[in-house]
Each structure stands twice: as C-alpha cells, then as structure tokens.
Image: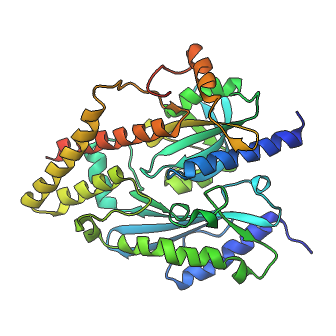
Amino acid sequence: MAISRKQALLWVLKELASHFERQGWHLFQKVTSSLMMTQEPGSGIQHILLVHAPFRPNDLPSPDVVGLSCAINVYFPELEKLIDEALHRDWSNRLSMRLPLSQLVPAEHLYAGNVHLIHVGADVQQAVQVFVSDFAAYLEPERRRLCMTSVFEEDGYQPRAVSPWSWRLRRAAYYARYMDAARRQALFAELNQQADAVLGMTASNDQTYSKIFTNIATLQRESILHGANELRRFLLAVQ
Amino acid sequence: MSGRRLAGMTAQGLAYISQEVGQHGYELIASEVSFETQSGIKIRIDGVYMGPDGHVMFGEAKVGDYADLTKNQKVGLPELQLGKGTFYGENAAEIAKALRVQFDANGRFTLKAEQIQGVYIGTYERAKPQTSRMQNINDFIRARGFWPRGGDN
C-alpha cells in the first residue's frame, strides 16, 4: 500500500534521527514534521541540528519526493549576552550563526536552491544517502570548526554561509570578553576601519531606505550597512 | 483563473524566488506563512527566509502578466517589516524553532523589527524569471504611499 507524504516524511526523519544519534546528536523532541537534535561540543556552546520540509508537498516537482532542508544553529551564550547588553536590546538573541546545508553543497544537489529531494518508496537508507553524505562532506567540517570558542582567534577564518559582518561582531565580542587589552585594541582598530569604510562609502548617497526590496543588490547593500552599523555600535559600547 | 492553475503558478513562483535568493545566501525556512498585523490585517506570504547575517527576510513571488500584491499585502507588508505581525498557523512553530524564538501553545509568535531584514518581492513571467515588471509594481505601490520612497530601485 502506498504511504502518504506525511508518513514518508516521518519515515525519512526517523531514519535520519537514528543516523545522527550514532554521530553523537541527542534528540531534542519527538520526531514529528521536523527533526531537532542538540549537541554541546564545548563548554558554553550549543549546536542545534534542524531538518525539516519547508516546501509544501504540492510545491515539489513530483509526488514521490520529500524536500528536506537542514541547518545547524550555533549558539555562544556568553557572546550573545555581551552583544545584547552592548546594543541595549530588550530581547535575547539565542542564535549566533546558522549553517544551512543548502549554502554549502553544489547547487545541482538541490531543488530550487534549497532542498534535497528524497525519493520515497525506495529503501530508506538508500533514499537518504546523498543527503547524509552531503551533510558529512560539507556541513560537518564547518560545524567542527565551531566547537571551540578559540576559533575566533584564527585570523582569516570565516565560516562559509555566514555573513562577514555577523562573524566580525562575534569575533569582536570574543575579544572583548577574553583577550588582553593589546590584542583587543588591535582587532577593534581593524574592525572599526572596515566598518567606517563601508559606512563612509555610502554617506554621500541616500541613507534612508525602505525595507521593501525588488532587487537583490539593494537587499544585500542594506544587509551590509546594517551589519557594519551594528558592529560599530558594539565597538563604541565596549571600548 | 482555475484553482489548479493558480496553485501551479504559486508553486512555480516559490521555486523561482527560492532559487533566486538562495544564490545570495538566503535559506527557505517555511512556505505559505500566515500572519496578522497589529491593525488586524491577515496576510499570507509565500516564503520566510533566513539570510547569512541571521536576519529574517520575507519573500513574495508574483508570476504572470496580471500578478500583483493583494490588497491586504499592500497594507500589511509595511507593518510586517516593522515587526508588527504575529505569525500563526501550521508553519509558525517551525519558523520559531528555526529562529530560536519563543512561541505560545498555539505556535504563535512575533519578531522584533531588529530581527527582520525586510520583504523581497520577486516578479517573474512565464517560464523564466524576469525583472521588467519590478519597477512598475514598485512605483504603483509607492505612489499610493504604502511604503516610503528610498534606496530601492
């Protein structure tokens, strides 16, 4: 008897849960329409693995597939607390950075640039094989780099799929929290210069922009401006 | 237009916009997401995405010669981008989990304006993405004062 898409998704997610449990992940909650697992790779660091199906079944190209998306949320609580305080947020950010598998694998492995299509009805281990091997080849190496806070001391390193400004902000928070004054000031001077270069470059243009976009270039420009501005506000607060 | 054709165009639009923004680092978190604004307007939007800087971006795809924003979208999207929207429905909890924000027993949650990058409207015609109608739609909406004139063009 043919199984429904909902059953097929559950079937695939349960197989993945077993696979990831063998890799050291712990189930966070019962598997339903998504899979959520955690790891604490180092003191004060939390990794959360999320697998879900963001497209509705009818939006996929075939009735015989489920479209899986996967990402790891990385959380450095101490750094986020420092950033929240410095930026005077009235809310707590519980997500330091996100590593989506879709941003790391070759585009031809994905449907609509976002999901792995898993063919249901076949052997379940075989069905998830490409997904699992892509996770191991592309996402796991990036995640492993983020198992220790000392990664922020590595000059020139920046995780793929994370914006440079988001990374610089966390790096600045790490230096503010853990590094001696000389090293802290050296990094802050460099980051200030980078932020000023971006913000100064746009000073002559209009600085009032809406948050409704119809082209990607403007969307990205806004993201860069926001990131540079946030970093500069943080540096001013902690210096 | 028949329901089947409309559904087909919606699916096509979502695939187009996801492909387009995906090339620039945006990941689809959920599709066909419902929210209610502070002023009580109920809206559905094609996709919720997360950008490489950890902010949320809402995506709305318009496919076909006569596609346009709905009346509610024209009024509600500017409210949404300011963080004045409550998410609800079957996809809401999934988004909340992905973003690590608190949600209530019914899966409802809100985002802070600071967490929202904005709304991206992708306009596509027939079988391949095009940009020719973007400016017209943008001008139409701005002319009615639904959102401010600014850097987008």
Q: Is residue B16 visible?
A: yes
Closest to the observer, B14 or A69: B14
Left or right? Give the position of A157 relative to B106: left
| Render colour scheme | rainbow
Task: State the image quarter where residue B70 is shown.
Answer: top right
Furthest-right residue in this view: A1
Residue at 81% over, 43% down: B7
- Frontmost residue, A135 versus B112: A135
Spot the residue most to the left. A182
Is residue A90 something one can see in this rendering? Answer: no
Name the residue at 33% across, 68% down. A44
In this image, A210 relative to B33: left or right? left
Location of residue A121 with respect to B47 vertically, above or below: below
Coordinates of residue B24 in the picture (x, y in percent): 50, 50
Which percent across, then down, holds residue B42? Answer: 68, 31
Looking at the image, how many numbered discs can be counted on the residues?
A: 0
- Measuring from the top left, give residue A155's x and y in whole percent: 23, 65
Identify the residue at image location x=45%, y=52%: B52
Quarter occupied by the N terminus of chain B: top right
Left or right: where A48 falls relative to A8: left
